[in-house]
Structures are given as structure tokens and as C-alpha cells.
Image (cartoon, grey):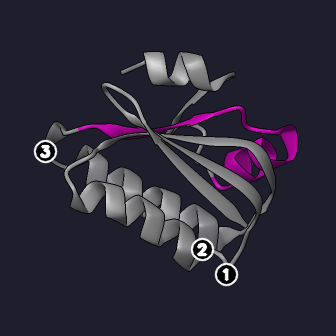
């Protein structure tokens, strides 16, 4: 799995490529925690190149969402979610917990 982070004026974009499972979720959690620990709570996660996600990856997403929404500081939004990943999010009931945008530009513009 590859993770790339870019800073914008009002948010941060995290691009995830590959598989997000129990072996790679600690790396994903570390990248997101690094942002929140530095006071960045408006995060866009781009799943355009994500091939697979397990409950471990979903757990990282929900924990980061809780951290970002605490005290109304920000939130995690998703962009470019492939249909198989969207199906996993929907099955877990996560589609109502996250704003999902069709492309990264719209997601970043949300903030």
C-alpha cells in the first residue's frame, strides 16, 4: 500500500493506493494520526486507486472521523470511491457517516 499526503489551504488530501487490510492499516492509521496530532482535522481520503478494504481499514476511518468531529473541529470526507469499496462501506453502514464525493477537487472544495 502507498499513502501520499498533500496539503491544501483548508484541508489535507490523503491518497491511498493498493490494499487496506490488517497488515497495512497501522500505516494508514499512522498517516492520519500524524495529521490530527498536528491539529489538522479537515481530511479528504482519496480512494481512487484503492483495490480492497477490510474491517481494519474501516476501523481506522471511523476512529479518525470521531477524532476530527470531536468539538466540531472538522471531518473526514471520501472521494473517488470505487464501486467495490462503496459496497463495503454501505454494507458496514458507513455511507451515512461520511460525505462521499465523486472527485478529489469537489471534496477539497467542500472545506
85 relative to 75 in the view: left or right: right
Helix, strand, or loop for circle 1?
Answer: loop
Count up the numbered dots: 3
Mark closest to the chain's N terminus, 3 or 1:
1
Q: Residues within 10 Å of mark 3 (few under 14, many from 20)?
A: few
Across and down, in percent, residue 20 comes to 71, 66
Q: Residue 36 carries which label?
A: none
Q: How crowded is mark 2: few (under 14 residues within 10 Å), some or many (20 or more)?
A: many
Q: Name the residue tied to disc 2.
A: 25
Q: Marks 1 and 2: in contact by CB < 8 Å?
A: yes
* Residue 22 versus residue 6 in the image, above or below: below
* Residue 49 versus residue 96 in the image, above or below: below
Across and down, in percent, residue 38 comes to 22, 56
- Mark-to-mark CA distance, 2 and 3: 26 Å
Across and down, in percent, residue 39 comes to 19, 50
Across and down, in percent, residue 8 comes to 39, 29
The region drawn magenta spans 74-92
Q: Name the residue tied to disc 1.
A: 22
Q: Quadrant of the N terminus?
A: bottom right
Of residue 62 and residue 9, the one placed in the foreground of this image is 9
Amino acid at each position: 500500500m502507498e499513502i501520499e499526503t498533500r496539503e491544501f489551504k483548508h484541508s489535507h488530501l490523503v491518497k491511498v493506493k493498493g490494499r487496506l487490510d490488517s497488515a497495512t492499516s497501522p500505516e494508514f492509521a499512522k498517516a492520519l494520526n500524524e495529521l490530527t496530532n498536528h491539529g489538522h482535522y479537515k481530511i479528504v481520503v482519496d480512494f481512487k486507486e484503492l483495490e480492497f478494504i477490510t474491517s481494519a481499514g474501516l476501523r481506522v476511518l471511523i476512529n479518525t472521523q470521531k477524532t476530527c468531529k470531536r468539538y466540531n473541529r472538522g471531518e473526514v470526507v471520501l472521494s473517488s470511491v470505487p464501486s467495490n469499496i462503496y459496497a463495503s462501506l454501505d454494507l458496514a453502514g458507513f455511507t451515512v457517516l461520511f460525505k462521499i464525493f465523486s472527485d478529489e477537487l469537489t471534496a477539497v472544495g467542500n472545506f
